[in-house]
Amino acid sequence: MNKEKHIIIAGGGAAGMIAAVAAAREGCKVSLYEKNEKLGKKLFITGKGRCNVTNACDMEDLFGAVVTNRKFLFSSFYGFTNEDVMELFEEAGLPLKIERGNRVFPCSDHSSDVIAALERMMRQAGVKVYLRQEIKGLAVRSEEDTDTGAVRQVCCGICLEGPDGKEKEVPADRVILATGGVSYPSTGSTGDGHAWAKMLGHKVTDLLPALVPFEAAEKEEVKALQGLSLKNIEIAVYNGKKELYREFGEMLFTHFGVSGPVILSASSFCAKAVSKGALKLVIDLKPALSGEQLDERILRDFAEAKNRQFKNGLSHLYPAKLIPEIIRRSGIDPDKQVNEITRQERRRLVEATKGLTFTLTGLRPFKEAIITQGGISVKETDPSTMESKRVKGLYFAGELLDLDAVTGGFNLQIAWSTGWQAGKAAAKDTTL
C-alpha cells in the first residue's frame, strides 16, 4: 500500500475521474482538481446526453476503430478492456445496455448517471475533489540522476492562484494531466494541458477538430436539402483520385454542408487533407444495387407511372426533398413524360443516384467538434505507464494525447483505458 503517496489529477473529465479511482484503489492519497463548478461537463453532453460509455466489440474491432496511433494503445487497451469498463460501471450500480453497432449506454439513457457512478467510486475510494480550482501551471524541479549524472526534470506538484492573487504550489509525488483537448471549449477544454506540456519541452502535434461536420461549396443545394437524413447510403471521400474514406450508414444535410454518423467518422480520416484543400464527397444513394440493377428498378417504376411527368414519377426512389436536386443533376426535363425518357437519360439518372457529388471545403469549428485530433506526442509518452519520457512523475491521459477514434464509444474507451493505466502506474511507481 502507498498510503503516504500523494497523486494530483488535473481535470475532472472521463480520463481524470477514472485515473483518480485507479490510483486511490491502490491506497494513494488522491486529489482531483477541476476548474468547472461540477465534474464531467463534456461527459454530460456525449451521445446526445445519453453517454455512449464504450463499445462491446471484440479487441480487433476496438483497435480497428482507432484513427491515430492505435499501436500505442496496445498496453492500455489490454490493461483495461471494454469488458473491464462495463464490469466496473455495473459493479458501481450503473446497469448498461448494448444497442446497434455494439454501442454501450446506461439503461437509464442519462449521462448524469455515468457521472454519478464515477463520483460514487471516487468517494468510496477516498478521492478528494476540488471544484472551481483552476490550475495555473505545473511545479517542476531539476535533479541529477545518481546513475548517469544527467539532469532531469521532475514534476512535484501544481500551481494554483492563492487568495492574495499570487501563485501557490500544491506539492504532490505524481501528477496526472487529464485536461482534455480543445473541442467544446464551453465545457472547459481550452488546451491548458497542451500549453503546460509545451513549456516543459513536449511536442504537441497540430490540433484539428474531429468527429465534426463538413462545410460544402454547394451552399444553395445543401440549404435546400437542410434537415434531410439519408439512411443506408454509402459515402466515399476523395482527394483528387485518392480515396481517403468509404463507409456505409447514415448522414444528414445541414444549412452549411453535411453531418451525421458516417460524415463525422469521415472527418477524422480527412481532417488533415481538407485543411489543405477541397475534397470530393460522393454519395451512393442505392449502394445495394449495381448500375444495371438500378436501371432495371427505374424501368419498373417508370412502367407503373408511364403516363406521369418525370418529376412525379420518382417518389418510390427518393425522399421528396431530394427529388428536385436529382432532377437537376440528371439534366432531364422535369415535365417530360416518363415513357419518353431515353436510355441515355436513364443512364444519367443512374449516375446522379450512384454518384451524388459535393465539394467539401472545410470542417466546422472546434466548438462543434466532438473530439480533438492531435495532441501531446505519443513518442514522448511511455505506452505501458502513460508517464512522460521528458518529465519524471508527470503522466498523461485521455484526449490530451495524440489519440482519436471514430464514433461509437471508442473515444471514451481511450479515455478509460489511458486514465486507468496512468492512475495505476502513478500509484505503483517507486522510482522517485
Image (tube, helix red, strand yellow):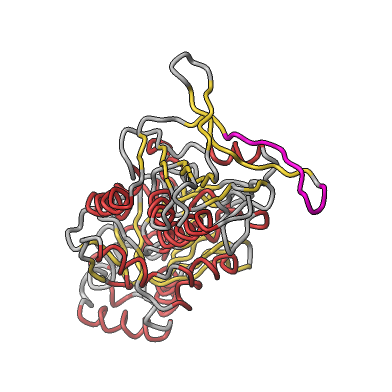
Q: Is residue 266 shown to the viewer in this render?
A: no
- Whether 306 is among the magenta residues is no
Quarter location, residue 195: top right
Farthest residue toward the top?
164
Task: Establish if 368 lies above or below 287.
Answer: above
Count of numbered labels shown in the rendering: 0
Q: Percent x, y for residue 371? A: 45, 51
Q: Is residue 37 visible?
A: yes
Q: Closer to the camera, 374 or 193?
A: 193
The image shows residue 72 at horizontal and vertical percentages of 59, 65
Quadrant showing the N terminus: bottom left
Residue at (35, 54) in percent of width and height: 253
Q: Residue 48 in the image: x percent, y percent?
A: 28, 52
Q: Nearer the viewer, residue 33 or 205?
A: 33
Q: Looking at the image, which residue is at 40% across and 72% down?
A: 248
How far from the left and from the top, in percent, is residue 144?
76, 43
State left or right for residue 106 relative to residue 286.
left
Picture quarter containing residue 299?
bottom left
What span is colored magenta in the figure? 138-149
Residue 58: name its quadrant: bottom left
- Residue sitting at the far right: 149
In-front residue for pair 316/77? 77
Q: Is residue 326 left or right of residue 192?
A: left
Q: Is residue 369 above or below residue 131?
A: below
In magenta stretch: residue 139: yes
